[in-house]
Image (cartoon, grey):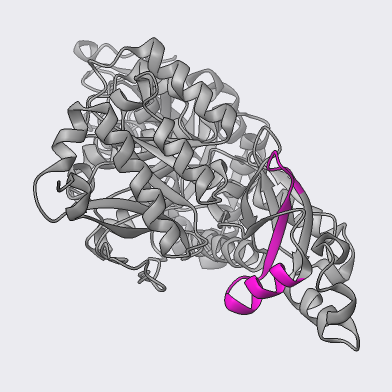
Amino acid sequence: MPSWTDHLRFAFQPVVNLTTGSVAALEILARPEQGDVVSRARHDAAVDGELAALGVRSAARQETLLPLHVNLFARTAAAAGGTAALRAAVADTGRLPWEVTLDLLPPFADVPQAPLLAAVRSLRRDGFRICADGIGEGDVPLRLLADLEPDLVKVDRSVVVRLPADRTCRAVLSGLRRFCDSTGGLLAVEGVETELQCAAALDMGAQLAQGALFAPPARRPAADVYLPAKNPAAAPAPPSVPAGPPILEFVQPAALLPVTASAETVRALLTGSPGVPGVVLVDDDGLPVGAVDRDRFLLSLSGRYGHALYADRPAVRLADLPRTVGTGATAWEVLGLVAADEPERAGDDIVVVDDAGRCAGVVRLADIVRALAERRVEEAVRLNPLTRLPGSDIINAETDRRIADGTPFAVSWLDVDGFKRVNDEAGFAAGDELIRAVGRTLAAAAAGLRTVRVGHIGGDDFLVLADPAELEPLACAVLDAPWSAGGMPVTLSLATLLCPAGSTADHRQAAACLAPLKQAAKALRGASWVLGRPGSVRQEVRRGSAARMSGSAGPADADRGVRTPG
């Protein structure tokens, strides 16, 4: 009697690491030739569990070493015995559980949360990794998403297709990246079809991606994928880790073998897979015990009597102690680890271990060095050549981040009064030196204040982003200083927009609200400081006493609610 499995085939789609350009894993996709077994699986945990198990067995026949992503409906994971067939398939095919990520699919809302969370804890104890899939189109409650603490969050194609034009979708991705950073997970996007979508996703912090742009699903795993060139003008990922990019951005699949593997087994793997730089030997619990470097290992076997001496013996005899870092490490910490090790091991892979000490993958030194170099170049491009302060793009990105976080902030615009006259009468060199001095003073004041970011947007204009509580010391530092250029006394004007949570949509709206405050500050005599709030015509004058030009409409009109110091 025919079975529903007789007309079932599977396809494989690469999950691409956007930092390294490598294939991080393969997602297994069911492709029924007759009927709609996927719809049946949605409502039948037994069918869904068997479908996942068949996918793992199909991947084993492809003899791929890459980690796997297996789709499983959340209802199946929560059901008693729902993952039994999958666990058996992983064991039968010789796969290690931590090489398998379970992509939990919606619907979630009608799934009992307690059994689901209990099942996830059990799967994690066995080493499986958990992904929350379909975010943006599915119905996962935010509380459940937080309780799951997924190792990976996958954003649905319905969100990605609206990139890069849709500002709200960009905000969703940026917020999810910060969520992943706080839980130690990674952010992935699905359905990427264009280079613009890829650039926007990368700009908003996505670390992994799938889609037809890189490689379509295929019956045989793709050997190569397309990765578009990075846009050098793209803003960097959210600055969540001050010590450098997180190491999770660089993790690649590790070639794992049990610690009991013979040298001949390792040799066969390395010679049959030219792209594999080494092998990690793990014990029964998945803990790395030895690291085999490709070149040194094959050189040992190729020497006189090398094969005869070592082929049938455990490969661990030719292995080094693995250099390990946790998943929370940063790129700079890894470089420090490499610098402190023996020079001959400088090019060896670094083994990344999870909280249980199990191998989560490897990182390659070349990828880290390349990414850090690119980041430094991008940062240098964004620095103003006169003051070496960042330009408006970095301040704008930080402004949008604080808006998305719901953090109250103040954005200020500072410039030199009558700067054209300074250049005309004192000369351009004196003007440049004045700008550099103002930049140094701002940078020095900001160095002692936790929330302050300073940018030089060109000419004599500076932007300052700060917590409202840190405004006063910053303003005093620049406004109370005696400024001059070529012997000419000079004053500065400061305009500040105080932005409570939810008061502004983005940095563009903040800039539009800030412009009239700058005009009001410029209309005052002496060092001036004017404050305002979005949506209000009231202005508060903190510094400056009278209009600069007779007959000008000064900001001290009673109907505008200002306070003008005497």
Drawn side of residue 14 relative to residue 21, left or right = left
**Compared with residue 269, is residue 121 higher up or lower down, i.e. above or below?**
above
Drawn side of residue 426 relative to residue 337, left or right = left
Residue 69: x %, y % from top left:
40, 47
Residue 440: x %, y % from top left:
64, 48
Residue 372: x %, y % from top left:
61, 61
**Compared with residue 317, is residue 329 higher up or lower down, i.e. above or below?**
above
Q: Is residue 16 visible?
A: no
Residue 406: x %, y % from top left:
37, 22
Q: What residue do we see at 27% from left, 66% from top?
A: 218
Q: Nearer the viewer, residue 523 or 274?
A: 274
Q: Which residues are magenta?
A: 264-288
Q: What residue do we see at 22% from left, 15% from top?
A: 110
Q: Is residue 520 magenta?
A: no
Q: What residue do we see at 47% from left, 65% from top?
A: 63
Q: Quadrant of the C terminus?
A: top left
Q: Nearer the viewer, residue 350 or 270?
A: 270
Q: Residue furthest bottom?
A: 304
Q: Residue furthest front?
A: 1
Q: Nearer the viewer, residue 505 or 375?
A: 375
Drawn side of residue 316 relative to residue 67, left or right = right
Please identify the quarter of the rendering in which residue 242 is found: top right
Q: Is residue 558 visible?
A: yes
Q: Nearer the viewer, residue 542 or 426?
A: 542
Q: What residue do we see at 36% from left, 52% from top?
A: 27
**Compared with residue 86, is residue 256 higher up or lower down, i.e. above or below?**
below
